[in-house]
Image (cartoon, rainbow, N blue to C red):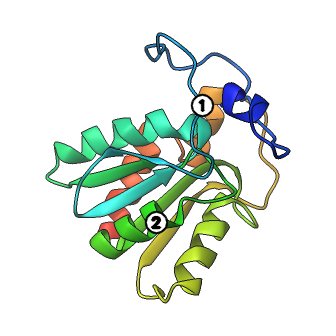
Amino acid sequence: MLKTAVYSDAPMALRYPRGAGFGVEMDSGLKTLEIGRGELLAEGGDLCVIAIGSTVIPALRAAESLQHKGIAASVVNARFVKPLDAELILSVARRTGCVITVEENALQGGFGSAVLELLFDNGLQDVKVKRLGIPDRYVEQGSQAQLRKDLGIDAEGIAAAAEQFLKS
């Protein structure tokens, strides 16, 4: 993302979450990403989890947990909040009819809201959507792990929300 931002002709903001990363394998060299392009990390037909930033790895882990329960979840790493990868998001939304967005950000006016607008503007009002993130209330102090658990944006919370959402 940093190389993409440096070599872009447009202003960009990168968000670095505090704390340690998840320990993913590093690429051998830096590459420039196509601006506004997400990536499909897992493919399933029951629902799609569209995650951004630090919620991507928990979303993948949730999909693995759901797979053990017979629920096939697609997982999208959105990569960019703006511009959204409309082609990818609309494709998975049409295919599954059920979308969960996950962000470590305010729900009101956040990433999930942008996805809702994209779906609405493209005539997909019938797609069921659940947004996971930080509600419009005071969030107590605590460790990152505890706060993510309390907000339901850790792997267990995402999986539980997905199961409940599919039942409703």
Relative depth, front residue between 101 and 80: 80
Relative depth, front residue between 47 and 5: 5
Query: Please, is residue 133 above or below residue 99 in the view?
Result: above
Quarter of the image with the N terminus is top right
Residue 118: x percent and y percent? 58, 75
Q: Residue 18 occupies which quadrant of the picture?
A: top right
Query: Please, is residue 122 above or below residue 48 in the view?
Result: below
Q: For the residues labelled 1 and 2, say whether their Cβ atoms are less than 8 Å apart.
A: no
From this viewpoint, which residue is outermost toward the top? 28
| Amino acid type for the residue under numbered disc 1 | Thr
Query: Please, is residue 61 above or below residue 46 in the view?
Result: above
Mark 1 or mark 2, which is nearer to you?
Answer: 1
Element assignment for label 2 = helix
Q: Is residue 135 visible?
A: yes
Q: Residue 30 occupies which quadrant of the picture?
A: top right
| Amino acid type for the residue under numbered disc 2 | Glu
Q: CA distance from mark 1 to mark 2?
A: 20 Å
What residue does disc 1 label? 32
Residue 166: x percent and y percent? 31, 68
Please tell me which residue is depicted at 23% across the width and 55% down the height of the picture: 44
Residue 110: x percent and y percent? 72, 60
Relative depth, front residue between 33 and 100: 33
Quarter of the image with the C terminus is bottom left
What residue does disc 2 label? 87
Q: Residue 145 occupies which quadrant of the picture?
A: top right
Relative depth, front residue between 168 and 66: 66
Q: Residues within 10 Å of mark 1 (few under 14, many from 20)?
A: few
Q: Which mark is residue 89?
A: none
Residue 136: x percent and y percent? 78, 62
Element assignment for label 1 = loop
Q: N-terminal of the two: label 1 or label 2?
A: 1
